Image: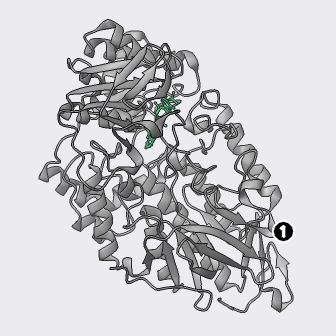
Amino acid sequence: MDTAPTPSAAHPVDAVVVGAGLSGLYQLHRLRGLGLRTVVFEAGDDIGGTWYWNRYPGARCDVESTSYSYSFSPELDQDWVWSERYASQPEILRYVHHVADRFDLRRDVVLNTRVTRAAYDEDRHLWSVSTDTGRTVTTRFVILASGCMSVPKDPGIPGADSFTGSTYHTARWPHEDVSFTGKKVAVIGTGCSGVQTIPVIAEQAAALTVFQRTPAYALPAHNRPLRSTEVAELKARYPEFRQAQRLSRGGTVFEPPTRSALETGEAERTATYETAWASGLLSGLLRTYTDILTDEKANETVAEFVRSKIRSTVTDPATAELLSPRTYPFATKRPCLDTGYYATYNLPHVKLVDLRTTPIETITRRGIRTSDGEHILDAIVFATGFDALTGSQLAFDIVGKNGVTLREKWVDGPRSHLGLVSAGFPNLFTVLGPLSPSVLTNIPVSLEQQVEWITDCIAYLRGHGFTEIDATPAAEADWCAHVAELAARTLYPAVASWYTGANIAGKPRGFLAYTGGLDRYREKCDAETRNGYTSFTLSTPPSSKAVSTRRSAPQSSLGL
Ligand code: NA7
């Protein structure tokens, strides 16, 4: 039952959080800790965010479960026990529910409620947040915790409405059981969702046809149940482990590489790659040498190693070649972690269609027609991805100072300081948004860092009597330039991927994440806190003479 409060204009809150996934729930917990009246609006009919929506067969995290979890509560670390090295979607969702119950979070979450508009009142330093249920609430702070991969991409294939069979999108999978037994099934898309679901659907379907435009680099997960002894051993050292995660470059603990791939002999390099391959870690190969993401030749040594693995797994040489990525360097599109992906193509009822040579012309009443003919189908699964990073923030109207919308401001690409605050949109914070480390890191560690920064910032504002914080245009310009400059040192920006916005027609191109590392990013965020938010303009209530300052703080504590 929805027992959450019913905020309205007459009953304002201090903070609105958009989204009840891992970020939103932790943000609620922390703001409550400050004593803020906080409400979370969630479009879904339950909490869980990514792990609520992406319930396709085979959905699983590709970061180890003992790392991909909250670190803020030592008690939580002790009482939750993961069953597998890589947790499945249902287990992660159970974990999210456990956390919500343990910290009594549900009472401030309003489900089935999509935010449709947020408009800033410059005179009162307040946001007015409207929802599709007709509720409008006035609040000082808005935190967008709506996810970096939460707006599914419309594949834009003509004829989709005419198909008389069943269609599914991996990111909007039905809650009831879907059976493919005895069915002729198509999967369109071979990114991480496709790579995870294809082997599982192949186990059921009578015939499976995979429609591939760009092959993935898929690495074996070597998933397995966790042994009770290793769980006990980790729990004994969880505090140190969590601290090491926080200080790490990407939110997982590893020894950074020190040598160049090109300065290493081939035999030694191959042995190193074999060890990384056997590790079952998504970033295992990336961590082998310093220049994998900065030097094409170094990268090619890993790319060719993965291709050799594909050739040794897939028995039909032509299929192996089609599955071998050759048009982009390793890891410049997100690599995938798989269980039995390549071997699935050895099954007699599984077929690969190469859309580069035989593109889809249309979806028909009976199936999919490519330039090579019609494939008759009972079901089509779209594993076609997301409008990543900016999609969820631009999905509704956000109207900032001078009536400018975020869509207008970001028409040529996202702009913000630290990926946290966009100038002209005061008191509006984003978790895991563009221009922050987000998708390049272990998500829970990144979101905790940003949520904690936002919480400290709000505490500072309240403690010093400020009612408004905005990024200065100069700081924002510097940050955007810094993000672009670091990305330009890597192989990422030249590749058409969702990292660069290229998977969405009309989306401005540009590398969307901060490549400098979570450790460096944390240090930059902490410096703002230490220095009293010098890259921001802090203001007192307009009614108390509208003093704006970047440095000196008034003594009174006005709260809200
Ligand atoms: P991705 O990684 O964006 O993969 C989408 C796949 O769908 C990719 O292979 C695309 O090919 C393909 N695609 C997209 N649109 C089409 C059309 N119209 N026709 C044919 N093929 C198409 O999304 P995922 O859901 O797999 O993974 C997203 C992230 O979620 C993942 O990396 C994890 O971080 C979690 P393309 O490469 O564009 O040629």
Residue 518: give x, y in percent of width and height.
54, 50
Residue 272 visible (yes or no) = no
- The relative height of residue 457 versus residue 511 in the rendered view (above or below) is below
Residue 293: give x, y in percent of width and height.
54, 28
What is the basis of the colouring in this image? one colour
Dividing the image into 4 quarters, which one contains the N terminus?
Answer: bottom left
Residue 423 visible (yes or no) = yes
Which sits in the foreground, 316 or 485? 316
Residue depicted at x 32% and y 52%: 174
Spot the residue most to the top. Answer: 317
- The relative height of residue 198 versus residue 39 in the rendered view (above or below) is above
Q: Which amino acid, mark 1?
A: Asn
Quadrant housing residue 108: bottom left
Residue depicted at x 86% and y 89%: 545
Spot the residue most to the left. Answer: 228
Left or right: residue 288 versus residue 341 is right
Residue 423: give x, y in percent of width and height.
76, 62
Residue depicted at x 36% and y 29%: 366
Q: Which residue is mark 1?
A: 402
Quadrant housing residue 341: top left
Residue 212: give x, y in percent of width and height.
43, 24
Dividing the image into 4 quarters, which one contains the C terminus?
Answer: bottom right
Which sits in the foreground, 190 or 290? 190
